[in-house]
Amino acid sequence: MPLAGPYGSKRTTGSAINAPRLSVGGELTLEGDCRIVGGTDVSLSDLGSFTVDGACVFSAPGQIALNLANSEVRSRVLLSPGTRVEGETLLVGLHVHGRLVLSGTCLSHPRAGRLITGSGLTVDGDLWLSGLHADRGWVRFRGATVKGEIDAAGAVLDNPGGVALSLYDCSVGGSVALRNGFHSRGAVLLNRITIDGRLDCRDGRFECPRITDQQRYVQAIDAASATARGGLYLGWARATPSVDFTNATTPLLADHPERWPGQFIVSGLTYDRFVHPDGPGNAVAWDHRKRSDWLKRQTVYDAGPYEHLASVFRRHGYTAEAEAILIEQRHEARRAGRTKPLRRALDAAFGWTVGYGFRPSRVLWLLLGLLVAVALSFQLPAVSDTMRATDERGNVYATDGRLVSVAPDDGLPNSFAHGSGRKPRADACGEGQVRCFSPALYAVDTVVPLISLGQRATWYANAKAPHGGLVDWWLNIATLIGWLLSTIFVLSFARMSRTT
């Protein structure tokens, strides 16, 4: 007879078994080849245990097929493998002091898109969903508390265009296993879940096909703000089209970087180290190239995951690899085009020369190349023939000897120098009157700032000589480039000190 109240006549209309507020001190069992057409309502009940044999069928398509809402079960709830439920299984507010076992159960014909509704469920033991088959409906355990583990290994949940499994805001004392043949077609919601053990997705298949353009859920896994204290084991076989681990927290990340989907979000994802997906006993490859390529596939460029990845590499002693990751981060920032064209050009030059401050030795090679270029240019007659030096008397010298000699000082004040009767001799040092010309030292004096070897102050390009103007421009440009490269070299150390 239907009872009045919130779980009274309106709720139980059409039920084949209508027994809300039932109290059974022992085991309530449905055995044999039983088929219940219509709803089974045992809500608000107090049971010792609840067991359903595998040959049983609850048939209430589009309605509540099995209602255990707000009941308390002192031991376990077991729907044996092979049990079929056509309609919704309502577990809202259910408290199970033992295990809740739904392994191998077949769910179909949802009510308003829901196959299981377990919001606020409390399970003191484990929640077993292994081998569960859910067809075209939502398996929902929002806000549930499971003090043991959730095992959904081998479960097949099919709800394309919607949510296949929701563990939103759940608290799990053990691990969550979505592995070993687990297959979802539809979103898996793990937002704000707290897992004291692992989130284990090894060899699972996660798919969220887009059915309509207005589809709300597009992530195969949405684990924003999830916490997995035992580690994220993400060695899935397939995850498409994208996953979201925004602000997720874990001490361990075990994955195959190349198996991540073409787009994903990991902004705010924090982890302390990497482990092999097959377990801690296997060697971990700290491959910064694979990790950098992994982050290139972010849905939207974010520098934070690069910074965190580099810090993890650095903490474990891979300093050079950490710097390579940060260099790649700057490359991606430039490709993302968030700055003005001039800034991008300067940034590209900074990266090419000193690796954004992480490769200061590169600029030394550029300076050395410039020094060699300047020194070798003086081996060309067209260049060396333009060089001149003048002493205080007005004697003019070329690199191969004196060109113009003047008469000795006649002692008259303000007198002009005039030609000497002696012939100039082939002496580039002016018999000690000028500094000898050295192509190598002249190159150092030209290119390296703050160093004066007297070469540039003594020797100059004669602008009136053939090609003299070009040589003068070449030397001045070499000086400017030398100053620029030296400045970049010094600034790179300042950047490194800020980064470290």
Image: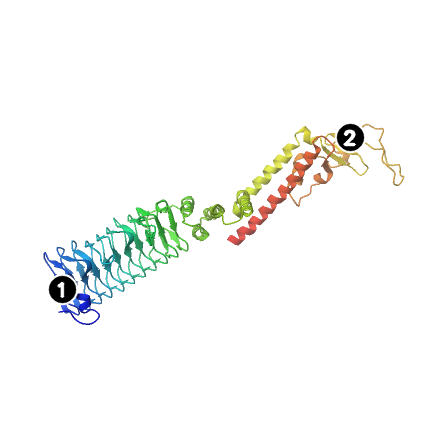
Horizontal side of residue 381 vs 141, given as left or right: right
At horizontal 24% and vertical 58% (from top left) the residue drawn is 112
Q: Nearer the viewer, mark 2 or mark 1?
A: 1
Few, some or many residues within 10 Å of mark 2 (<14, 14–19, 20+): many
- On the image, numbered disc 2 is attached to which residue? 403
Helix, strand or loop at label 2? It is: strand
Horizontal side of residue 426 vs 20, given as left or right: right
Quadrant assignment, res 411: top right
Between the C-alphas of marks 2 and 1, the distance is: 122 Å
Q: Is residue 490 visible?
A: yes
- On the image, numbered disc 1 is attached to which residue? 17
N-term-proximal mark, 2 vs 1? 1
Q: Position of residue 174 (x, y in %)?
A: 28, 59
Check the image and name the residue furthest to the right. Answer: 412
Q: Amino acid at mark 1?
A: Ile
Which mark identifies residue 180? none
Check the image and name the residue furthest to the top. Answer: 423
Viewer-proximal residue among 263 and 357: 263
